[in-house]
Image (tube, rainbow, N blue to C red):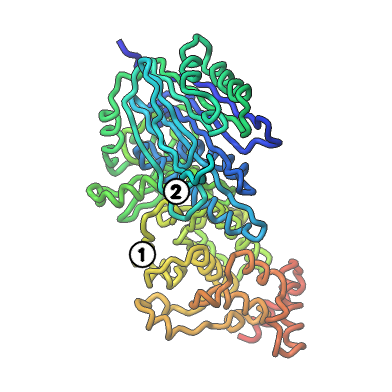
Amino acid sequence: MQSTTLKVNLGCVSDAGIKPSNEDAANFRVPELDHQLEHKGVCCVLADGVSTAEAGREASDIAVTRFVEDYYLAPDTWSVAHCGQKVLSATNLSLFKKSHKFRQEEKGFLCTFVGLIFKSQTAHFFHVGDSRIYLYRDNEFKQLTQDHSTFIGGGKSYLTRALGMDNNLHVDYGKIELKVGDQFVLSSDGMHDFVTEQDIINVLNNDSSEKDKAQQLLELAVNNDSDDNISCVVAKIEELSNQSLDDLNAKLTRLPFPPDLQPGMKLDGYKVIREMFASPRSQLYLVEDEDSGEQIVMKTPSINYSQDTAYIDRFIQEEWIGKRISSDKIVKIVQQSRPRTCLYYLMEFVEGTGLDDWIGLNPLPAPKDAIDIVKQIAKGLDAFHKNDSVHQDLRPANILINDENQIKIVDFGSTFVAGTAELFNPIEHEGALGTATYSDPQYLLGKNPGIQGDLYALATIAYELFTGHWPYGEQVENCKTAFDYDHLRYQSASYHNPIIPIWFDRALEKGVQLDIEKRYPTIQHFLKDLTHPNPDYLLDVPESSTEHNTIMFWGILSGSMIVLLLIVISMFNAS
Protein backbone atom coordinates (compact mmCIF):
# COMPACT_ATOMS: atom_id res chain seq x y z
CA MET A 1 0.00 0.00 0.00
CA GLN A 2 1.31 3.47 -0.86
CA SER A 3 2.26 5.89 1.86
CA THR A 4 -0.01 8.86 2.46
CA THR A 5 3.06 11.13 2.57
CA LEU A 6 5.37 12.15 -0.25
CA LYS A 7 9.01 11.35 0.51
CA VAL A 8 11.88 12.72 -1.60
CA ASN A 9 15.60 12.30 -0.90
CA LEU A 10 17.68 15.26 -2.06
CA GLY A 11 21.31 16.29 -2.47
CA CYS A 12 22.70 19.62 -3.64
CA VAL A 13 26.17 20.99 -4.47
CA SER A 14 27.40 24.26 -5.96
CA ASP A 15 31.04 25.13 -6.44
CA ALA A 16 33.07 27.85 -8.16
CA GLY A 17 35.24 25.24 -9.92
CA ILE A 18 38.33 26.87 -11.42
CA LYS A 19 36.70 30.30 -11.45
CA PRO A 20 37.47 32.89 -8.74
CA SER A 21 33.80 33.20 -7.71
CA ASN A 22 30.65 31.12 -7.92
CA GLU A 23 27.86 32.69 -9.96
CA ASP A 24 25.63 29.61 -9.65
CA ALA A 25 23.02 29.11 -6.95
CA ALA A 26 21.11 25.96 -6.00
CA ASN A 27 18.77 25.01 -3.20
CA PHE A 28 15.83 22.84 -2.17
CA ARG A 29 13.14 22.83 0.51
CA VAL A 30 11.16 20.05 2.12
CA PRO A 31 8.33 21.51 4.27
CA GLU A 32 8.25 20.44 7.88
CA LEU A 33 4.48 20.81 8.26
CA ASP A 34 2.39 17.98 6.81
CA HIS A 35 -0.32 20.24 5.41
CA GLN A 36 2.29 22.36 3.61
CA LEU A 37 3.94 19.24 2.20
CA GLU A 38 0.53 18.14 0.96
CA HIS A 39 -0.54 21.49 -0.50
CA LYS A 40 2.80 22.83 -1.77
CA GLY A 41 5.06 19.81 -2.14
CA VAL A 42 8.87 19.65 -2.34
CA CYS A 43 10.82 22.29 -4.26
CA CYS A 44 14.32 22.25 -5.77
CA VAL A 45 15.86 25.00 -7.90
CA LEU A 46 19.06 25.93 -9.69
CA ALA A 47 20.22 29.14 -11.39
CA ASP A 48 23.37 29.98 -13.34
CA GLY A 49 24.46 33.63 -13.52
CA VAL A 50 25.24 34.68 -17.09
CA SER A 51 29.03 35.12 -17.15
CA THR A 52 28.94 38.09 -19.54
CA ALA A 53 26.65 39.97 -17.15
CA GLU A 54 28.39 41.84 -14.34
CA ALA A 55 25.69 40.96 -11.82
CA GLY A 56 25.17 37.30 -12.73
CA ARG A 57 25.95 36.14 -9.21
CA GLU A 58 23.40 38.49 -7.64
CA ALA A 59 20.82 37.48 -10.26
CA SER A 60 21.13 33.75 -9.56
CA ASP A 61 20.97 34.30 -5.78
CA ILE A 62 17.84 36.43 -6.15
CA ALA A 63 16.18 33.95 -8.52
CA VAL A 64 16.74 30.92 -6.29
CA THR A 65 15.89 32.67 -3.02
CA ARG A 66 12.74 34.39 -4.30
CA PHE A 67 11.37 31.33 -6.05
CA VAL A 68 11.63 29.14 -2.96
CA GLU A 69 10.33 31.79 -0.58
CA ASP A 70 7.53 33.16 -2.75
CA TYR A 71 6.35 29.72 -3.86
CA TYR A 72 5.70 28.66 -0.27
CA LEU A 73 4.07 32.01 0.53
CA ALA A 74 1.62 31.64 -2.35
CA PRO A 75 -2.00 30.60 -1.63
CA ASP A 76 -2.63 26.85 -1.37
CA THR A 77 -5.46 27.25 -3.84
CA TRP A 78 -3.16 28.30 -6.71
CA SER A 79 -2.09 25.55 -9.08
CA VAL A 80 1.64 24.82 -9.24
CA ALA A 81 1.80 26.05 -12.84
CA HIS A 82 -0.01 29.30 -12.04
CA CYS A 83 2.05 29.91 -8.91
CA GLY A 84 5.45 29.13 -10.46
CA GLN A 85 4.87 31.33 -13.46
CA LYS A 86 3.62 34.24 -11.33
CA VAL A 87 6.65 34.02 -9.06
CA LEU A 88 9.07 33.81 -12.00
CA SER A 89 7.38 36.69 -13.83
CA ALA A 90 7.70 38.92 -10.78
CA THR A 91 11.35 37.90 -10.28
CA ASN A 92 12.15 38.44 -13.96
CA LEU A 93 10.73 41.98 -13.93
CA SER A 94 12.67 42.79 -10.77
CA LEU A 95 15.95 41.65 -12.38
CA PHE A 96 15.14 43.48 -15.60
CA LYS A 97 14.54 46.72 -13.68
CA LYS A 98 17.80 46.26 -11.76
CA SER A 99 19.71 45.90 -15.01
CA HIS A 100 18.24 49.17 -16.29
CA LYS A 101 18.83 50.93 -12.99
CA PHE A 102 22.54 50.09 -13.13
CA ARG A 103 22.97 50.32 -16.89
CA GLN A 104 25.47 53.15 -16.53
CA GLU A 105 27.65 50.73 -14.57
CA GLU A 106 27.06 48.11 -17.28
CA LYS A 107 25.55 45.66 -14.80
CA GLY A 108 23.29 42.99 -16.19
CA PHE A 109 21.22 40.95 -13.75
CA LEU A 110 20.83 37.84 -15.91
CA CYS A 111 20.68 34.14 -15.09
CA THR A 112 19.33 30.84 -16.33
CA PHE A 113 16.82 28.96 -14.19
CA VAL A 114 15.37 25.50 -13.64
CA GLY A 115 12.85 24.63 -10.94
CA LEU A 116 11.23 21.33 -10.01
CA ILE A 117 8.19 20.89 -7.76
CA PHE A 118 7.15 17.43 -6.51
CA LYS A 119 3.53 17.57 -5.39
CA SER A 120 1.24 14.62 -4.75
CA GLN A 121 2.00 12.25 -7.62
CA THR A 122 3.25 14.81 -10.16
CA ALA A 123 6.51 16.57 -10.97
CA HIS A 124 6.16 20.13 -12.30
CA PHE A 125 9.16 21.78 -13.96
CA PHE A 126 10.01 25.33 -15.04
CA HIS A 127 12.85 26.27 -17.35
CA VAL A 128 14.53 29.40 -18.75
CA GLY A 129 17.97 29.29 -20.39
CA ASP A 130 20.44 26.42 -20.79
CA SER A 131 20.44 24.83 -17.33
CA ARG A 132 18.84 21.39 -17.51
CA ILE A 133 16.61 18.84 -15.81
CA TYR A 134 17.11 15.10 -16.43
CA LEU A 135 14.89 12.15 -15.49
CA TYR A 136 16.24 8.63 -14.92
CA ARG A 137 13.46 6.02 -14.79
CA ASP A 138 13.55 2.26 -15.33
CA ASN A 139 17.07 2.45 -16.81
CA GLU A 140 15.99 5.14 -19.29
CA PHE A 141 17.74 8.51 -19.17
CA LYS A 142 15.89 11.54 -20.59
CA GLN A 143 16.43 15.31 -20.76
CA LEU A 144 13.16 17.04 -19.84
CA THR A 145 14.20 20.55 -20.88
CA GLN A 146 15.38 22.03 -24.18
CA ASP A 147 18.20 24.59 -24.07
CA HIS A 148 17.26 28.15 -24.99
CA SER A 149 20.45 28.81 -26.94
CA THR A 150 21.60 29.23 -30.51
CA PHE A 151 24.89 27.93 -31.94
CA ILE A 152 26.86 30.40 -34.04
CA GLY A 153 29.73 28.18 -35.16
CA GLY A 154 33.15 27.43 -33.78
CA GLY A 155 31.60 25.59 -30.87
CA LYS A 156 30.11 28.84 -29.59
CA SER A 157 26.53 29.61 -28.68
CA TYR A 158 24.52 32.38 -27.09
CA LEU A 159 21.48 32.39 -24.85
CA THR A 160 18.14 33.30 -26.39
CA ARG A 161 16.30 33.38 -23.06
CA ALA A 162 17.27 34.20 -19.48
CA LEU A 163 15.71 35.70 -16.37
CA GLY A 164 16.16 39.47 -16.49
CA MET A 165 16.79 39.59 -20.25
CA ASP A 166 13.41 41.04 -21.21
CA ASN A 167 10.48 42.58 -19.36
CA ASN A 168 8.21 39.86 -20.78
CA LEU A 169 9.22 36.37 -19.70
CA HIS A 170 8.50 33.17 -21.63
CA VAL A 171 8.77 30.18 -19.29
CA ASP A 172 8.81 26.56 -20.41
CA TYR A 173 6.50 24.58 -18.12
CA GLY A 174 5.83 20.87 -18.08
CA LYS A 175 4.66 18.10 -15.79
CA ILE A 176 4.92 14.31 -15.59
CA GLU A 177 3.37 11.66 -13.39
CA LEU A 178 5.80 10.32 -10.80
CA LYS A 179 6.84 6.75 -10.06
CA VAL A 180 8.60 5.47 -6.96
CA GLY A 181 12.31 5.20 -7.78
CA ASP A 182 12.37 8.14 -10.22
CA GLN A 183 15.63 10.11 -10.08
CA PHE A 184 16.04 13.70 -11.26
CA VAL A 185 19.13 15.79 -11.88
CA LEU A 186 19.16 19.59 -12.15
CA SER A 187 22.45 20.89 -13.54
CA SER A 188 24.29 23.97 -14.75
CA ASP A 189 26.32 23.83 -17.96
CA GLY A 190 29.51 23.60 -15.90
CA MET A 191 28.39 20.09 -15.02
CA HIS A 192 26.45 18.66 -17.96
CA ASP A 193 28.82 20.04 -20.62
CA PHE A 194 31.67 18.03 -19.06
CA VAL A 195 30.00 14.84 -17.80
CA THR A 196 28.61 12.26 -20.23
CA GLU A 197 25.11 10.86 -19.90
CA GLN A 198 26.58 7.43 -19.22
CA ASP A 199 28.66 8.82 -16.37
CA ILE A 200 25.54 10.41 -14.88
CA ILE A 201 23.68 7.10 -15.18
CA ASN A 202 26.55 5.26 -13.49
CA VAL A 203 26.45 7.67 -10.56
CA LEU A 204 22.66 7.43 -10.22
CA ASN A 205 22.87 3.62 -10.22
CA ASN A 206 25.15 3.40 -7.19
CA ASP A 207 23.89 3.05 -3.62
CA SER A 208 25.19 6.38 -2.35
CA SER A 209 23.00 9.06 -0.79
CA GLU A 210 21.69 11.78 -3.06
CA LYS A 211 24.10 14.23 -1.44
CA ASP A 212 27.03 11.93 -2.26
CA LYS A 213 25.77 11.46 -5.82
CA ALA A 214 25.69 15.24 -6.33
CA GLN A 215 29.23 15.50 -4.99
CA GLN A 216 30.40 12.68 -7.29
CA LEU A 217 28.96 14.46 -10.32
CA LEU A 218 30.74 17.65 -9.31
CA GLU A 219 34.05 15.80 -8.97
CA LEU A 220 33.57 14.16 -12.38
CA ALA A 221 33.09 17.61 -13.94
CA VAL A 222 36.25 18.89 -12.24
CA ASN A 223 38.26 15.84 -13.38
CA ASN A 224 36.99 16.37 -16.93
CA ASP A 225 38.43 19.92 -16.93
CA SER A 226 35.23 21.91 -16.45
CA ASP A 227 36.06 25.59 -16.95
CA ASP A 228 32.91 26.93 -15.32
CA ASN A 229 31.03 26.98 -12.03
CA ILE A 230 29.55 23.57 -11.26
CA SER A 231 26.15 22.98 -9.65
CA CYS A 232 23.66 20.15 -9.49
CA VAL A 233 20.72 18.87 -7.47
CA VAL A 234 19.89 15.17 -7.29
CA ALA A 235 16.42 14.02 -6.20
CA LYS A 236 15.00 10.53 -5.74
CA ILE A 237 11.33 9.65 -5.16
CA GLU A 238 11.15 7.22 -2.25
CA GLU A 239 7.41 7.28 -1.53
CA LEU A 240 4.31 8.81 -3.09
CA SER A 241 1.10 10.07 -1.61
CA ASN A 242 -1.92 7.86 -2.37
CA GLN A 243 -4.04 10.94 -3.14
CA SER A 244 -4.30 11.83 -6.81
CA LEU A 245 -3.41 15.32 -7.93
CA ASP A 246 -6.85 15.82 -9.48
CA ASP A 247 -8.52 15.02 -6.16
CA LEU A 248 -6.21 17.39 -4.35
CA ASN A 249 -6.76 20.24 -6.80
CA ALA A 250 -10.51 19.76 -6.68
CA LYS A 251 -10.40 20.05 -2.90
CA LEU A 252 -8.31 23.21 -2.95
CA THR A 253 -9.98 25.14 -5.74
CA ARG A 254 -13.52 24.45 -4.57
CA LEU A 255 -13.26 25.64 -1.01
CA PRO A 256 -16.70 26.90 -0.01
CA PHE A 257 -17.34 30.44 1.17
CA PRO A 258 -17.82 30.48 4.94
CA PRO A 259 -21.24 31.53 6.25
CA ASP A 260 -21.82 34.73 8.19
CA LEU A 261 -20.03 34.08 11.47
CA GLN A 262 -21.48 34.88 14.89
CA PRO A 263 -19.68 35.25 18.24
CA GLY A 264 -18.99 31.84 19.74
CA MET A 265 -18.95 29.99 16.40
CA LYS A 266 -15.83 27.94 15.57
CA LEU A 267 -14.10 27.41 12.23
CA ASP A 268 -10.98 25.25 11.77
CA GLY A 269 -9.99 25.73 15.41
CA TYR A 270 -10.64 29.50 15.48
CA LYS A 271 -13.35 30.81 17.82
CA VAL A 272 -15.18 33.95 16.71
CA ILE A 273 -15.09 36.74 19.31
CA ARG A 274 -16.81 39.51 17.34
CA GLU A 275 -17.36 41.00 13.92
CA MET A 276 -15.02 43.93 13.33
CA PHE A 277 -16.09 45.09 9.87
CA ALA A 278 -18.48 44.17 7.10
CA SER A 279 -19.00 45.46 3.57
CA PRO A 280 -20.66 44.10 0.43
CA ARG A 281 -17.27 42.58 -0.51
CA SER A 282 -15.83 41.05 2.68
CA GLN A 283 -16.00 40.64 6.44
CA LEU A 284 -13.40 40.91 9.21
CA TYR A 285 -13.75 38.91 12.43
CA LEU A 286 -11.69 38.94 15.61
CA VAL A 287 -11.03 35.27 16.38
CA GLU A 288 -9.04 33.28 18.91
CA ASP A 289 -6.78 30.35 18.05
CA GLU A 290 -7.98 27.62 20.39
CA ASP A 291 -4.54 25.99 20.42
CA SER A 292 -2.41 29.05 21.23
CA GLY A 293 -4.97 31.45 22.67
CA GLU A 294 -3.71 34.14 20.28
CA GLN A 295 -6.19 36.70 19.01
CA ILE A 296 -6.01 37.25 15.26
CA VAL A 297 -8.19 38.65 12.48
CA MET A 298 -9.98 36.44 9.96
CA LYS A 299 -10.97 37.94 6.62
CA THR A 300 -13.74 36.16 4.74
CA PRO A 301 -15.15 36.79 1.24
CA SER A 302 -18.70 37.96 0.76
CA ILE A 303 -21.17 35.30 -0.32
CA ASN A 304 -22.33 37.84 -2.95
CA TYR A 305 -19.30 36.83 -5.04
CA SER A 306 -19.39 33.06 -4.65
CA GLN A 307 -19.77 32.61 -8.44
CA ASP A 308 -17.34 35.38 -9.44
CA THR A 309 -14.07 33.64 -10.39
CA ALA A 310 -12.20 36.94 -10.87
CA TYR A 311 -13.20 38.05 -7.37
CA ILE A 312 -12.17 34.70 -5.88
CA ASP A 313 -8.77 34.81 -7.57
CA ARG A 314 -8.26 38.37 -6.35
CA PHE A 315 -9.22 37.43 -2.79
CA ILE A 316 -6.78 34.53 -2.84
CA GLN A 317 -4.03 36.78 -4.19
CA GLU A 318 -4.44 39.21 -1.28
CA GLU A 319 -2.97 36.67 1.11
CA TRP A 320 0.04 36.05 -1.13
CA ILE A 321 0.71 39.76 -1.53
CA GLY A 322 0.58 40.28 2.23
CA LYS A 323 3.00 37.43 2.88
CA ARG A 324 5.55 38.78 0.38
CA ILE A 325 5.73 42.28 1.90
CA SER A 326 7.45 42.57 5.25
CA SER A 327 7.45 45.80 7.27
CA ASP A 328 6.53 46.86 10.78
CA LYS A 329 4.29 49.44 9.10
CA ILE A 330 2.20 46.85 7.25
CA VAL A 331 -0.23 44.41 8.84
CA LYS A 332 1.22 40.89 8.87
CA ILE A 333 -0.43 37.83 7.36
CA VAL A 334 -0.59 34.90 9.80
CA GLN A 335 0.61 31.56 8.46
CA GLN A 336 -2.02 28.82 8.59
CA SER A 337 -1.13 26.03 11.02
CA ARG A 338 -4.10 23.81 10.09
CA PRO A 339 -5.83 22.90 6.81
CA ARG A 340 -8.68 25.18 5.73
CA THR A 341 -12.20 23.94 5.15
CA CYS A 342 -13.40 27.33 3.85
CA LEU A 343 -12.02 30.28 1.93
CA TYR A 344 -10.49 32.89 4.28
CA TYR A 345 -7.12 34.13 5.47
CA LEU A 346 -5.66 35.37 8.75
CA MET A 347 -3.94 38.60 9.81
CA GLU A 348 -2.37 39.91 12.99
CA PHE A 349 -4.73 41.80 15.30
CA VAL A 350 -3.69 45.45 15.62
CA GLU A 351 -5.01 47.62 18.44
CA GLY A 352 -5.97 51.02 17.15
CA THR A 353 -8.39 53.03 15.09
CA GLY A 354 -8.61 54.11 11.49
CA LEU A 355 -6.58 57.19 10.59
CA ASP A 356 -9.78 58.73 9.21
CA ASP A 357 -11.38 58.61 12.66
CA TRP A 358 -8.13 59.77 14.28
CA ILE A 359 -8.01 62.86 12.05
CA GLY A 360 -11.57 63.69 13.04
CA LEU A 361 -10.65 63.47 16.72
CA ASN A 362 -7.32 65.28 16.30
CA PRO A 363 -7.84 68.28 14.01
CA LEU A 364 -4.59 70.08 13.16
CA PRO A 365 -2.28 67.86 15.26
CA ALA A 366 1.18 69.10 16.25
CA PRO A 367 3.31 69.31 13.08
CA LYS A 368 5.92 66.97 14.54
CA ASP A 369 3.23 64.32 15.06
CA ALA A 370 1.74 64.85 11.61
CA ILE A 371 5.09 64.65 9.81
CA ASP A 372 6.00 61.53 11.79
CA ILE A 373 2.78 59.84 10.62
CA VAL A 374 3.57 60.78 7.01
CA LYS A 375 7.07 59.28 7.35
CA GLN A 376 5.65 56.05 8.77
CA ILE A 377 3.19 55.70 5.90
CA ALA A 378 6.03 56.35 3.45
CA LYS A 379 8.08 53.59 5.09
CA GLY A 380 5.22 51.14 4.63
CA LEU A 381 4.78 52.15 0.98
CA ASP A 382 8.51 51.72 0.42
CA ALA A 383 8.14 48.04 1.42
CA PHE A 384 5.42 47.65 -1.23
CA HIS A 385 7.51 49.33 -3.90
CA LYS A 386 10.64 47.30 -3.13
CA ASN A 387 8.55 44.23 -3.96
CA ASP A 388 7.40 45.77 -7.26
CA SER A 389 3.93 46.28 -5.77
CA VAL A 390 1.69 49.34 -5.65
CA HIS A 391 -1.01 49.61 -2.97
CA GLN A 392 -3.36 51.60 -5.27
CA ASP A 393 -5.98 52.29 -2.59
CA LEU A 394 -4.12 54.16 0.14
CA ARG A 395 -6.50 56.23 2.26
CA PRO A 396 -6.90 57.00 5.97
CA ALA A 397 -9.50 54.23 6.38
CA ASN A 398 -6.85 51.71 5.26
CA ILE A 399 -4.35 52.91 7.86
CA LEU A 400 -4.58 51.92 11.53
CA ILE A 401 -3.05 54.12 14.24
CA ASN A 402 -2.60 53.25 17.93
CA ASP A 403 -2.32 55.32 21.11
CA GLU A 404 1.42 55.86 20.51
CA ASN A 405 0.68 57.22 17.01
CA GLN A 406 2.27 54.15 15.39
CA ILE A 407 0.62 53.15 12.12
CA LYS A 408 0.05 50.04 10.03
CA ILE A 409 -1.20 49.92 6.45
CA VAL A 410 -3.94 47.34 5.84
CA ASP A 411 -5.97 45.95 2.93
CA PHE A 412 -4.20 44.38 -0.06
CA GLY A 413 -7.37 44.09 -2.12
CA SER A 414 -6.34 46.62 -4.77
CA THR A 415 -2.59 45.99 -4.77
CA PHE A 416 -1.02 45.71 -8.21
CA VAL A 417 2.02 43.41 -8.48
CA ALA A 418 4.16 44.16 -11.50
CA GLY A 419 5.06 41.09 -13.51
CA THR A 420 2.14 38.95 -12.32
CA ALA A 421 -0.83 40.69 -13.95
CA GLU A 422 -1.50 40.09 -17.60
CA LEU A 423 -3.37 43.39 -17.80
CA PHE A 424 -3.46 46.42 -15.56
CA ASN A 425 -6.88 46.86 -13.99
CA PRO A 426 -7.53 50.23 -12.36
CA ILE A 427 -9.10 50.08 -8.92
CA GLU A 428 -12.86 50.14 -8.68
CA HIS A 429 -14.43 52.16 -5.90
CA GLU A 430 -17.65 51.34 -4.15
CA GLY A 431 -18.67 54.98 -3.84
CA ALA A 432 -17.87 55.15 -0.15
CA LEU A 433 -17.37 58.68 1.20
CA GLY A 434 -13.79 59.82 0.79
CA THR A 435 -12.54 56.82 -1.18
CA ALA A 436 -12.05 58.57 -4.54
CA THR A 437 -10.61 61.61 -2.81
CA TYR A 438 -7.21 59.97 -2.30
CA SER A 439 -7.01 58.12 -5.64
CA ASP A 440 -4.83 59.35 -8.46
CA PRO A 441 -7.11 60.57 -11.31
CA GLN A 442 -4.93 58.48 -13.62
CA TYR A 443 -6.77 55.39 -12.33
CA LEU A 444 -10.13 56.82 -13.37
CA LEU A 445 -8.70 57.45 -16.82
CA GLY A 446 -7.60 53.81 -17.08
CA LYS A 447 -3.87 54.53 -16.77
CA ASN A 448 -1.29 52.98 -14.48
CA PRO A 449 0.71 55.69 -12.65
CA GLY A 450 2.76 53.10 -10.73
CA ILE A 451 4.37 54.32 -7.50
CA GLN A 452 3.32 57.89 -8.33
CA GLY A 453 -0.26 56.80 -7.66
CA ASP A 454 0.69 55.91 -4.08
CA LEU A 455 2.63 59.19 -3.89
CA TYR A 456 -0.50 61.15 -4.83
CA ALA A 457 -2.45 59.42 -2.05
CA LEU A 458 0.33 60.02 0.50
CA ALA A 459 0.55 63.72 -0.38
CA THR A 460 -3.24 64.04 -0.10
CA ILE A 461 -3.16 62.45 3.35
CA ALA A 462 -0.30 64.75 4.37
CA TYR A 463 -2.31 67.77 3.21
CA GLU A 464 -5.30 66.62 5.24
CA LEU A 465 -3.21 66.04 8.37
CA PHE A 466 -1.87 69.59 8.25
CA THR A 467 -5.07 71.36 7.18
CA GLY A 468 -8.09 69.19 7.92
CA HIS A 469 -9.14 69.58 4.27
CA TRP A 470 -8.42 68.07 0.84
CA PRO A 471 -6.13 69.76 -1.70
CA TYR A 472 -8.84 70.11 -4.38
CA GLY A 473 -11.79 70.50 -2.06
CA GLU A 474 -14.86 68.32 -1.83
CA GLN A 475 -15.72 68.67 -5.51
CA VAL A 476 -13.01 66.13 -6.34
CA GLU A 477 -15.44 63.40 -5.29
CA ASN A 478 -17.79 64.31 -8.12
CA CYS A 479 -15.16 64.07 -10.86
CA LYS A 480 -15.94 61.40 -13.45
CA THR A 481 -13.99 62.46 -16.53
CA ALA A 482 -10.74 64.15 -17.50
CA PHE A 483 -12.80 67.26 -18.27
CA ASP A 484 -14.03 67.33 -14.65
CA TYR A 485 -10.48 67.17 -13.31
CA ASP A 486 -9.41 70.01 -15.61
CA HIS A 487 -11.72 72.31 -13.65
CA LEU A 488 -10.09 71.54 -10.31
CA ARG A 489 -7.74 74.06 -8.72
CA TYR A 490 -5.29 73.40 -5.91
CA GLN A 491 -6.16 75.19 -2.66
CA SER A 492 -3.12 76.52 -0.85
CA ALA A 493 -2.55 74.68 2.42
CA SER A 494 -1.72 78.01 4.08
CA TYR A 495 -5.29 79.16 3.36
CA HIS A 496 -6.52 76.55 5.87
CA ASN A 497 -3.50 76.71 8.19
CA PRO A 498 -1.66 80.08 8.12
CA ILE A 499 1.43 78.76 9.90
CA ILE A 500 2.36 76.54 6.95
CA PRO A 501 5.38 78.06 5.15
CA ILE A 502 5.36 78.54 1.39
CA TRP A 503 8.05 75.90 0.70
CA PHE A 504 6.03 73.27 2.58
CA ASP A 505 2.85 74.21 0.73
CA ARG A 506 4.59 73.96 -2.63
CA ALA A 507 5.92 70.50 -1.76
CA LEU A 508 2.37 69.40 -1.02
CA GLU A 509 1.16 70.97 -4.26
CA LYS A 510 3.76 69.12 -6.32
CA GLY A 511 2.88 65.86 -4.57
CA VAL A 512 -0.77 66.12 -5.67
CA GLN A 513 -0.22 67.44 -9.19
CA LEU A 514 -2.92 66.06 -11.48
CA ASP A 515 -0.41 66.09 -14.33
CA ILE A 516 1.84 63.13 -13.52
CA GLU A 517 4.74 64.71 -15.41
CA LYS A 518 4.73 67.60 -12.91
CA ARG A 519 4.47 65.34 -9.85
CA TYR A 520 7.43 64.08 -7.82
CA PRO A 521 8.97 60.96 -9.39
CA THR A 522 9.39 59.18 -6.04
CA ILE A 523 8.19 59.36 -2.46
CA GLN A 524 11.77 59.98 -1.34
CA HIS A 525 11.89 63.21 -3.36
CA PHE A 526 8.58 64.29 -1.83
CA LEU A 527 9.73 63.60 1.74
CA LYS A 528 12.98 65.47 1.19
CA ASP A 529 11.16 68.66 0.17
CA LEU A 530 8.58 68.17 2.90
CA THR A 531 11.23 68.06 5.65
CA HIS A 532 13.94 70.35 4.20
CA PRO A 533 13.10 73.73 2.63
CA ASN A 534 13.70 73.59 -1.10
CA PRO A 535 15.38 76.88 -2.16
CA ASP A 536 13.54 76.77 -5.48
CA TYR A 537 10.26 77.14 -3.62
CA LEU A 538 11.42 80.33 -1.92
CA LEU A 539 11.93 82.33 -5.11
CA ASP A 540 9.76 85.42 -5.58
CA VAL A 541 8.56 85.23 -1.99
CA PRO A 542 9.15 88.15 0.43
CA GLU A 543 12.03 87.15 2.66
CA SER A 544 10.41 88.44 5.81
CA SER A 545 7.23 86.43 5.16
CA THR A 546 9.14 83.27 4.34
CA GLU A 547 11.41 83.59 7.34
CA HIS A 548 8.50 84.31 9.66
CA ASN A 549 6.43 81.30 8.55
CA THR A 550 9.42 78.95 8.54
CA ILE A 551 10.48 79.91 12.06
CA MET A 552 6.92 79.48 13.32
CA PHE A 553 6.54 76.12 11.55
CA TRP A 554 9.79 74.59 12.76
CA GLY A 555 9.24 76.04 16.19
CA ILE A 556 6.04 74.07 16.44
CA LEU A 557 7.65 71.04 14.83
CA SER A 558 10.30 71.05 17.56
CA GLY A 559 7.54 70.91 20.16
CA SER A 560 7.94 74.35 21.68
CA MET A 561 5.00 74.71 24.02
CA ILE A 562 5.39 78.50 24.21
CA VAL A 563 5.07 78.97 20.46
CA LEU A 564 2.16 76.55 20.35
CA LEU A 565 0.35 78.56 23.03
CA LEU A 566 0.92 81.87 21.25
CA ILE A 567 -0.37 80.49 17.96
CA VAL A 568 -3.48 79.01 19.52
CA ILE A 569 -4.22 82.34 21.27
CA SER A 570 -3.62 84.39 18.12
CA MET A 571 -5.79 82.07 15.99
CA PHE A 572 -8.53 82.22 18.61
CA ASN A 573 -8.45 86.04 18.71
CA ALA A 574 -8.42 86.25 14.93
CA SER A 575 -11.56 84.14 14.73
Residue 352 appears in the figure: no
Residue at horizontal 69 percent and vertical 79 percent from the top: 569
**Quadrant of residue 221 within the rendered picture:** top right
Relative horizontal placement of residue 222, taking residue 171 as reference (left or right): right
In the rendering, which numbered label is found on residue 85?
none
Relative to 216, is 574 above or below?
Answer: below
Q: Quadrant of the N terminus?
A: top left
Say which residue label 1 marks. Answer: 429
**Quadrant of residue 24 within the rendered picture:** top right
Residue nearer the viewer, 413 or 434: 413
Badge 1 local density, few (<14 within 10 Å), some, or many (20+)? few
Residue at horizontal 58 percent and vertical 21 percent from the top: 220
Residue nearer the viewer, 552 or 141: 141
Give residue 410's position: percent from left, percent from top: 48, 53
Residue nearer the viewer, 311 or 433: 311
Say which residue label 2 marks. Answer: 89
Give residue 541's position: percent from left, percent from top: 70, 89
Residue at horizontal 41 percent and vertical 40 percent from the top: 84
Most extreme residue toward the front, as rendered? 154
Residue 411 appears in the figure: yes
Give residue 195's position: percent from left, percent from top: 53, 24
Q: Secondary structure at mark 2?
A: helix
Name the amino acid, label 2.
Ser
Q: Secondary structure at mark 1?
A: loop
Most extreme residue toward the left, as rendered? 307
Sequence-wise first label, 2 or 1: 2
**Quadrant of residue 464 within the rendered picture:** bottom right
Q: Quadrant of the C terminus?
A: bottom right
